[in-house]
Image: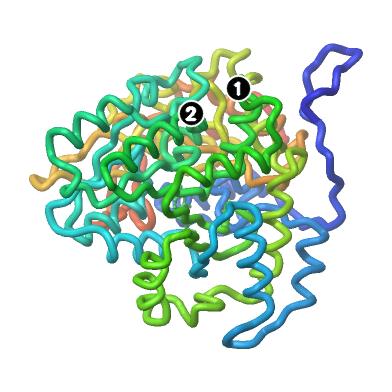
Amino acid sequence: MANIKYHLGEEIPLEMHKVRMIQRLDLVPIERRLEAIKEAGNNTFLLYNKDIYLDMLTDSGVNAMSDNQMAAMMTVDDSYAGSATFTRLKDKLSDIFDKKYFLPVHQGRACENLLSMAYVRKGTYVPMNYHFTTTKAHIMVNGGEVLELHMSEALNPVSSDPFKGNMNLDALNELIEKEGADKISFIRLEAGTNLIGGQPVALENYIATSKIARENGIPFIIDASLLADNLHFIKTREEKYKDHSIREITKLLSETADIIYFSARKLGHVRGGGIITNDESVYKTLLEMLPLYEGFSTYGGMSTREMEAMVVGLEETMDEEMINQGPLFIKYMINELLKHGVPVITPPGGLGAHLNAMEFLSHIPQEEYRAGALASALYIASGVRGMERGTVSEEREADGSDHLAAVELLRLALPRRVFTLSQVKYTIDRVVWLYENRKLIGGLEFYEEPKVLRFFFGKLKPTSNWQEKLVEKFKQDFGDSL
Ligand SMILES: *Cc1c(COP(=O)(O)O)cnc(C)c1O
């Protein structure tokens, strides 16, 4: 896919797969889209799928499976305990990652629950390159504190740093020196930092972080949910590893960690998750909790059919052509948007394209939720559903004031192998139109606000009639087009 040259010069990401199963989509008229977003309280989580044309909310549990994954689901050993399906999955994981022990769970955050209960104590710290929503919540529930030791480039929206997800090693050393290793529950590296644009971590950085952890006797844990994209970026951006196979890179990366956990909703394209380790005592500690929270140790809350599909999905992750479609489509989208001056997060990462709403809607006060307003406006203009990752996704301060986010992003996730290039082009077209008409977009305010994780169920309304004006302009420009 990467090495195809075009006579006409345009750089087009070319898929090394074909589509053999399809799902019908509708694009409802703009009047209905305006109605639908009002019904949803301008919260894209609350839209119904029947009103959505392209669902770019998330990459979680919505990636396309392969024919071989589907076929594997038909040959399953469904026993409650000791199934051959479990053995196949455990063997595949140990073949790929060189880790002996495997604990299956129902999804990624369940790993975080078990690991936080086992390791986090009141008053301890968990340093990491960047937090993820569910990770932070589990650590906090157990009395720990999350410390984000990222590089300064991590939060710079326009950057050429190929590995914005790297851990800040100096800050990590300083922390250990100041607080002592005993105060640190574990060190966590997230492959492909979800919340700052799917930005990857260099293999050199995994190795260096691991060295610090080992020298100080602190457990080193990798969150490998977004590993597939990160593997692609190591191979394509880290000079030293460009001739290594994906499988070799995975082994080197895995070697650095005491424990690896993942959401199989992303890694492996199914719905589930797991923890792997070579440490028998870690395994035994976690094993005791497994039946209480997840299920028996050979299924852990996962459907055995999905476990069979995961065996195949993990093997396919070792094939560069099977994992590069996402990152290459995202790169295409980002480069096209840049050509039209649209503020986006660079360099392109994994997971999705991220619009920089801070700048896109700089005329709106940040208190009126720039990223939330952009999510609403894009849905009205296109039927495309994105996810707000800005101030709406933050929790209020103790005194009730809003915690203004450091970055205001509209994430347009590209579930792996799901959309076609024409659908991506349509999205680019509507984003560019919206950018040219950005001054028409106004702010939002809450009228229903849950106390925790308000972004899931909270409802907002526009601060003026800007949405009607946006619809009017759309009709002027596009006539009777949907
Ligand atoms: C999605 C995700 C999780 C949580 O996984 P779920 O399967 O949604 O529970 C944890 N970490 C990262 C980096 C993720 O992207």
Image check: 471 left or right of 110? right
Instruction: Say which mark, if any, is on residue 204.
Output: 2
Q: Is residue 214 left or right of residue 316?
A: left
Q: Is residue 380 visible?
A: no
Instruction: Identify the residue at horizontal 45%, vertical 36% (top origin).
Output: 206
Identify the image quadrant of residue 322.
Answer: top right
Mark 1 / mark 2, whichever is N-terminal: 2
Q: x, y (%) of residue 460?
A: 34, 47
Q: What residue type is disc 2 on? A: Glu
Residue 409 picture quarter: top left
Q: Are marks 1 and 2 in contact (CB under 8 Å)?
A: yes
Q: Position of residue 18 (x, y in %)?
A: 86, 46
Q: Quadrant of residue 143?
A: bottom left
Q: Position of residue 260 (x, y in %)?
A: 47, 53
Q: Confirm whether residue 300 shows in the render.
A: yes
For the residues marked 1 and 2, what is the alpha-carbon distance in whole angstroms?
Answer: 9 Å
Q: Residue at x 54, y 48 (%)?
A: 58
| Identity of the residue drawn at 52% across and 69% down | 104
* Residue 401 locus on image (x, y percent): 14, 41
Mark 1 lies on residue = 240
Q: SS class of the residue under badge 2?
A: helix
Category of crowding for the residue at label 2, using alpha-carbon neighbours closer than 10 angstroms: few (below 14), some (14–19), many (at least 20): some
Quarter of the N terminus within the rendering: top right
> How many numbered callouts?
2
Viewer-nearest residue: 58 or 233: 233
